Amino acid sequence: MAIQNNPGRVAVIGAGKMGSALLAGFLKCGLVDPRHAVVVEPGLTRRSELAREFPGVTCLAQVTQLELGAGDICLLAVHPETVTPVLQQLRDRLNGALLVSIAGGVTTDQLQAEVEEGTPVVRVMPNTPAMVGEAMSLLTPGTHVTKTALKSVVKLFESVGRACVVAEELQPAGTAVSGSGPAYFALVASALIRAGVMHGLPLALAVELTEQTMLGTARLLQESGMQPESLIDVVSSPGGTTAVALAELENAGLRAAFTNAVDAAVARTLKQGLDEDPDDATKA
């Protein structure tokens, strides 16, 4: 049975980790009424899980069961390589609805080329901390998006963290920093935990020390307005333990390694899109 148009409806196509995390945030903050939310997920087992996880939300098996219209938002949370076939099924069913895509590397121009002329589209790159309400999301509006519509999308993504609007040309660098960033920090956390254990710390304590230190440092930078280099100076004293540790990191080429990592991520993002087979949309 097709879903009839209902102004304010939010349809999520693809309910992987990111799609479901975003829907959970939209519902939790009260921006979306469960009765006005739809999830399209082909897997029967996953649909059953979603029905239990999101009471009142309509769960559909096929995009062809969906009908939307002006005032509705359609969130495309599928693998980049499946964007084209999904939009081929969806294009006649949007009927003026706002299309929001979190498919990595797929530009607003590419999205607009796959839908009816005049369809408003917004490209978004959230990151995995959306799962705990601490995402950083980068939004780029297409040609036909009004200020009011863009504001509504920003508000939705602010329900799972922070959101900012950026130009299309900044998306690759933004993706390389914030989209891939959680993996960088997780790698640093893993290294610190291992080092602590090597020096006798119990694993649980090493994990707690590392996680709380990362969390506290992030909050300190955010809330104090202090620049990273200033915080380094505050923590370090001449000839002290932090100073000698930092010297080792500098000698190991840490800064250059991060620069090279971001360079590689930017290059990969530019190659991603409708003609590639990159990681799924929950990953940068």
Image (cartoon, rainbow, N blue to C red):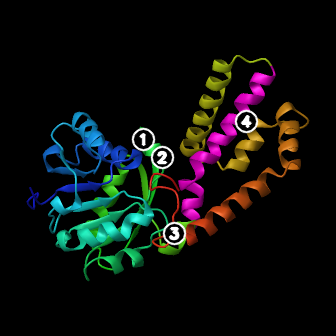
For disc 4, the marked residue is 191
- Label 4 and label 1: CA atoms lie apart by 23 Å
For disc 2, the marked residue is 128
For disc 1, the marked residue is 131
On residue 276, which mark appears? 3
Residue type at tag 3: Glu
| Image x and y of residue 50, in percent | 26, 40
Q: Note whether 186 is above or below 81 in the view shown.
A: above
| Image x and y of residue 124, in percent | 41, 62
| Image x and y of residue 197, in percent | 75, 22
- Which of labels 4 and 3 is toward the front? 3
Residue type at tag 1: Met
Judged from the image, the secondary structure of the residue bearing numbered disc 3 is loop
Give the residues in magenta.
173-199
Q: Earlier in the sequence, mark 4 or mark 3?
A: 4
- Label 2 and label 3: CA atoms lie apart by 22 Å
Q: Note whether 105 is above or below 217 in the view shown.
A: below
Query: Which residue occupies 88% across, 37% down?
Result: 244
Q: Are marks 1 and 2 in contact (CB under 8 Å)?
A: yes
Query: How would you classify the magenta stretch by its main secondary structure?
Result: helix
Residue type at tag 4: Ala
